[in-house]
Image: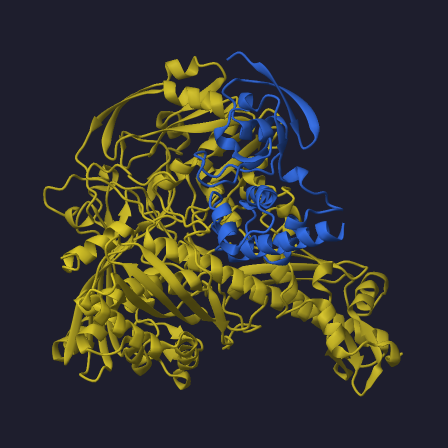
Amino acid sequence: MNESTPPKEERSAALSGLGTSRKRVEDARFTQGKGNYVDDIKLPGMLFGDFVRSPYAHARVKSINTEKAMAVPGVHAVLTAADLAPLSLHWMPTLAGDKQMVLADGKVLFQAQEVAFVVADDRYAAADGVAAVEVEYEELPVIVDPFKAEADDAPVLREDIADQKEGAHGPRRHPNHIFTWESGDLEATEAVLAEADVVAEEMIYYHRTHPCPLETCGSVASMDKVNGKLTVWGTFQAPHAVRTVASLISGIAEHNIRIISPDIGGGFGNKVGVYPGYICSIVASIVTGVPVKWVEDRSDNLMATAFARDYWMKGRISATKDGKITGLHCHTTADHGAFDACADPTKFPAGFMNICTGSYDIPTAYLAVDGIYTNKAPGGVAYRCSFRVTEAAYFIERMIEVLAIKLGMDAAELRVKNFIKKEQFPYQSALGWEYDSGDYHTGWEKALKAVGYEDLRKEQAERVEAFKRGDTRKLLGIGLSHFTEIVGAGPVKNCDILGLGMFDSCEIRIHPTGSAIARLGTISQGQGHATTFAQILATEIGIPAEDITLEEGDTDTAPYGLGTYGSRSTPVAGAATAMAGRKIRAKAQMIAAYLLEVHDNDIEWDVDRFVVKGAPERFKTMKEIAFASYNQAIPGVEPGLEAVSYYDPPNMTYPFGSYICVMEIDVDTGTTEIRQVFALDDCGTRINPMIIEGQVHGGLTEALAIAMGQEIAYDEQGNVTTGTLMDFFIPTAVETPNYQTDYTVTPSPHHPIGAKGVGESPNVGGVPAFSNAVHDAFRAFGLTQSHMPHDHWRIWKTAESLGLHD
Amino acid sequence: MEKMHVKMTVNGKNVDLLTEPRTLLIHALREELGITGPHVGCSSSHCGACTVDMNGMSVKSCTVFAAQAEGADITTIEGLGTPDALHVLQEMFKEHHGLQCGYCTPGMITRAYRLLQENPTPTEEEVRFGIAGNLCRCTGYQNIVKAILEAAAKMNDMKESA
């Protein structure tokens, strides 16, 4: 019998399990145009809804006249706040403990705010209807600058809560103030800063931008009045949470609501929240009795649906003369727009911004974040990052550069001097986190070597001399970045969203013939879950990945989970998958022992089978065990082979990496040319290297966009000036460079397979690498700080302000 | 609004649409013909998710009226390969991980198909320039470019051996 058993390696390879660059199972449908995105859904009798949106950033709504719109051919209904009020649906709760208007209730607070919802035969008739709705506005003074929002004479934006002195996150000191969130020891930090040899101080602005997935947000709601069931298909990164929220705010019992996330065309945090369009499509379906689709257009998406960042971070960092960092102080003014709709765990109104001590052993630190209302769109989502982690990483990686300038030290050397050392892990940060594992020095040295750092510095010095001589008009920037993320939210003890603990889940059913289906509480938006989670399982249970179907996104069939964002799928649902797999294996062991007529402890796992210890010719494969579980009466063992795991992670995971960008800058045009980008990631155990590399390429490109041009900008009247793809920068294949990637592996000690998550690392690490390259190019000419995005115009202005055009 | 007849050939089949003069080609394809491979990403000709092949040219079907396609020969992603015989580009996109969320993919492959008709032996730079009208938010293009270059090489090999 043993002669026919293929060698271990061969059997292991046949599984396409952990660590293999398995080709994606999703690609067959996507490459043939057979994806099923929300706008592909077409139901009998379905109507289409579209919004009348506010042209003003702040105005009183004097009247809404829907008469002409109702007369437009094909228009079935026009909903306003007055129609939603009897259902108490004219406002909705936000994920951040605030509330948000579904449709304008008396006033509008940002440009493109939803004012009325027109339901018509198709999108063309709906557009006709939208154009025919007459709204009379009275303009009000506008606040676009968060630093002016708390003036005594500032207009009160949120009249609904003007008198509330207490918000969801503590006291409010002004009607336009949302919260103040503090972390760390203020007194000790001030004392350290006061006594320090050197203190560097700078305002670091991480501008407002937008995740802008290629597919916008949308939903199709279908209220079946016969059965009392509501089904909603939509672009939901957290379908189970959407079901609970929909139930709580609509009063429809949760078992009568089915939420389905079909294929999602990119999310990047944009599709975490609950938006007025979802609510209106549901109400419209209830009102009209037929399915109603809402799909926003690109400008709706950019102008109204979930911006990201907009953090003004005032930093002070102190060090000894020889460059040992002693303290860090950060005060952040956070522009949240008109409603606090940040998608953060409830107890963290500024997300995990307190990871802002970064990769460094900083003994004393303090952070305060003030959330402020302005006349801008709500949001504050984690655009390809864990909650506010990219802001934190950008802040500390800029502060390190600023400190290096102040100390007259090489910025790479300053980092090495202050990195948390390998032997310090698990490391307790001054702001309260326990970093699980790390080895920063190894990756950093590898990265410096890969780019030839010392030679680059020599070349840069020569370039500066040549520039001064007038031999060149191009400068060379070397952008350094070492990031530490905090992802995988998170432990239920301190992480919840609207009271829902941030665990995640996996349910596995093994079929009689030895193939399987696994369902998870997460939802892929391009990450390739159907490919990678099957790999985790293949290794755990010895069934080839290609024999495992993976399903997510249907709340009627998938186990409850909090969804996919904040790089939490692998750390949390990936762990649940491994744990559920281990439950399957534990039961399989009992079955195998029974079949082999030995004690459970006398057999051991061997890739895809249990073998009798010391007698490898006696074994039962997982396939045989699966069949037996369905046809044998085994004493004390229930029939079937299924398991479910709800995984509450004991800690976050802390991926890290070393990124370096080499950039040429034309001083006269402000144009940039990226010569090299080197990205070394450590995401712990690697599940699928091909997919990891793809995630790194994509995240770096989003980082490039953010750092170099992508922005949601407002004029003084609160008009969005970047509301189309004409103005909102998305790099094409021409602007995007080729990337070099590398890795180290430092497994997470608390994760069942040691994986940490990677999807967001390249964005978190990439933004400071690109931005630091721009700054570094001008360092020799006295630049310490300039604000992103570094588009050609801003770079030209920087050169101008430094006198380089004279 | 009064409707009009528009006749065209889509993926080798003759179709006769009765549609409003203002109907955009992308909506005619997606909503009236059920061809949902091409997607809408921006409705302003920037992103290329709606790219189809029309009379031997790549066009962004979000800014073409269906009426303008009267008599046209149109190929969409659905017309490039079959499940049993994928187009080389479809195979190479999978092989080189040239897609993630899949939303840009039909337009991207349809554009690449025309690009390789126009220039069967492109350089990397020519590929990058040739797909600059198609945006991808997920991949950073590196693997897309690799897939297209590899597809070009394979298509040329096939031609030579034929």
Q: Which of A762 and B127 is in front in this view?
A: B127
For the point 20% across and 53% down, which residue is it?
A797
Chain B's shade in the image?
Answer: blue
For the point 48% across and 68% down, which residue is it?
A741
Whether A335 is drawn above or below A327: the answer is above
Task: Please give left or right for residue A256 compared with residue A789 in the image.
Answer: right
What x and y, as percent, mark residue A562?
Answer: 50, 55
In which quadrant is the N terminus of chain A drawn? bottom right
What x and y, as percent, mark residue A636?
Answer: 78, 69
Whether A355 is drawn above or below A507: the answer is below
In which quadrant is the C terminus of chain A drawn? bottom left
What x and y, as percent, mark residue A277?
Answer: 44, 35
Task: Please give left or right for residue A223 compared with residue A169 in the image.
Answer: right
Whether A100 is drawn above or below A8: the answer is above
Q: Can residue A314 be seen in this view?
A: yes
Q: Extreme bottom residue here?
A: A614
Total numbered badges shown on the rendered structure: 0
Q: Extreme front residue here?
A: A471
Q: Extreme left residue here?
A: A152
For the point 48% across and 19% down, which residue is it?
A76
What's the image's color scheme? by chain
Q: Which of A361 and A508 is in front in this view?
A: A361
Q: Is residue A167 visible?
A: no
What x and y, as percent, mark residue A781?
Answer: 18, 66
Quadrant hosting residue B118: top right
For the point 52% across and 17% down, which residue is it?
B21
- Which chain comes out yellow in the rendered image? A
Task: Please give left or right for residue A554 compared with residue A315 in the image.
Answer: right
Q: Nearer the viewer, residue A290 or B128?
A: B128
